[in-house]
Amino acid sequence: MSVNVRIPTILRTYTGGRAEVTAEGATLAEVIADLEKNHTGIAARVLDDQGKLRRFVNVYVNDDDVRFEQGLETATPEGAGVSIIPAVAGG
Amino acid sequence: MAAQTVASTSTSATTTPVDLGPAAALSCRECGQRFELGPIFACAECFGPLEVAYDLPSGSPEELRKRIEAGPANIWRYAPLLPVPADVADKPNLNPGWTKLVKADNLARELGVTGSLFIKDDSGNPTHSFKDRVVAQALEAARAFGYTTLSCSSTGNLAGAVGAAAARAGLRSCVFIPHDLEQGKVVMAAVYGGELVGIEGNYDDVNRFCSELIGDPLGEGWGFVNVNLRPYYAEGSKTLAYEICEQLGWQLPDQLVVPIASGSQLTKIDKGLQELIKLGLVEDKPYKIFGAQAEGCSPVSTAFKAGHDVVRPQKPNTIAKSLAIGNPADGPYVLDIARRTGGAVEDVNDEQVVDAIKLLARTEGIFAETAGGVTVGVTKKLIEAGVLDPALTTVVLNTGDGLKTLDAVADTSQATAVIRPSLDAFRAAGLAG
């Protein structure tokens, strides 16, 4: 499955400044592993030492927050948009 | 915190050193990494939220207290403790703060409080919510970083505060809100003449949109007060803590009841209290901070009661829209603070929110927005449960004006009677005496 991944500003040092890259994988975990293969260092920014999503990272597959879905096991269908976004507060 | 090197930041607007008064650097709350002052909000190492680290003023507490007391009757009396230049009071801004701390004796009697009960009534700010405090900080950061458009994602109150602040400062504003907000908040956001954009979705959708916009060339040169300027913006809530203590005669309250949306306000009130202790401006003693949520959006309360230290997001469904943030970024820190201070996090349902709004209105003449109904309602619930000590000094926050959320009480707050203009009709209505 090929998906489009939107990269936040603070991770663009790993993608040569690109705001969007493509990656392969049927689940979010596989997509992140593929990102790491092509953009070394990015997985350690997104995942903690236990391999879980860091608590201040929000990831969306299409319009769905993966924390409402199956987390790293959330399916990433062909052509899906994946957004990695730092958590921010507001109101 | 371990000694850290200060990493440089990449800023789109400027790379020259900025004058933000005592602000020395940005520091990651998670890993402690420090960064130069800039329009960034997330740690490049771990995504943790960044906050302002200070070189706080030296000198005796007495001198600092006198300096503050001689300052203007607004938040700038605390400029030595905020990320703003020393001449901030001379620049065009809304000069918010120094709102009333109301001794609520009638409400205290109703609730069985034998100690002192106060309402910190922040509806008295220029756009009638506490948001003017935080926007004023972000405005100074926006100026320092050379931004000419002020923006935000908002549940309503913030949009109005940004619109007004930008108008006063002569900046453009473009703010984003959920499309289905209360009419009062929509009008208050639009009237200042900036752009107002309704997003088809809830606040979390708006927030996500703005986070993506800021990383896109479309958002180039925009200062989002609660995204890329958030470390500075959030510091404005410290002024609530400063004011409460100064208004209590430079004393810490025993108990505070604070609403939770993102959780930022509660964490910064705690930071403000800790700074006052560190500076010797108040005598150190234990205090408890209680967080208040609406049942229909209670991710932090749910986590607190379950003993969790992480917050599972919820889809909001409550009349307290200003608190309807289902994925509160500062939730984990709120849990830490409530537990560290011996406080708690509780929630009330929408009916209890309405009852509490009316209770505060009829006992103290204060018309609170739904967030104020949440704090008063939670205070009542915590007293009844024996969690909040009625014999101590308690401060309850009202963060906004009831005129913004008229819908919440409109159905049950109508004319007692409609009569012909005659004495006979008045007598017949049974209202004399």
Image (cartoon, rainbow, N blue to C red):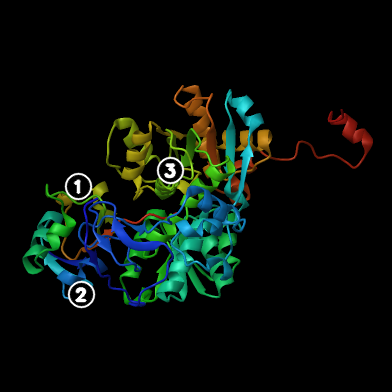
Lower sequence index among marks 1 and 2: 2
Q: Residue at x 23, y 48 (%)?
A: A69
Quarter of image, res B398: top right
Q: CA distance from mark 3 to mark 1?
A: 45 Å
Amino acid type of the residue that numbered disc 2 sits on in the rendered structure: Arg
Q: Which residue is mark 1?
A: A70
Q: Residue at x 43, y 75 (%)?
A: B147
As drawn, the residue found furthest toward the right would be B423
Q: Secondary structure at mark 3?
A: helix
Which numbered dot is residue B277?
3
Compare residues B254 and A32 and report the one nearer the observer: B254
Q: Is residue B232 left or right of residue A8?
A: right
Q: Is residue B26 left or right of residue B167?
A: left
Q: Residue at x 41, y 42 (%)?
A: B297
Q: Secondary structure at mark 1?
A: loop
Chain at numbered mark 3: B
Q: Residue at x 62, y 51 (%)?
A: B124
Q: Same subunit under labels 2 and 3?
A: no
Residue B23 image point, x, y percent: 39, 62
Q: Is residue B122 left or right of residue A5?
A: right
Circle 3 residues within 10 Å: few <14, some 14–19, many ≥20: some
Residue B359 image point, x, y percent: 62, 33
Q: Is residue B321 above or below residue B134?
A: above
Amino acid type of the residue that numbered disc 1 sits on in the rendered structure: Gln
**Is residue B306 something that shows in the picture?**
yes
Chain at numbered mark 2: A
Which of discs 1 and 2 lies nearer the camera? The answer is: 2
Quadrant showing the C terminus of chain B = top right
Quarter of image, res A20: bottom left
Amino acid type of the residue that numbered disc 3 sits on in the rendered structure: Ile
**Is residue B324 something that shows in the picture?**
no
Q: Secondary structure at mark 2?
A: loop
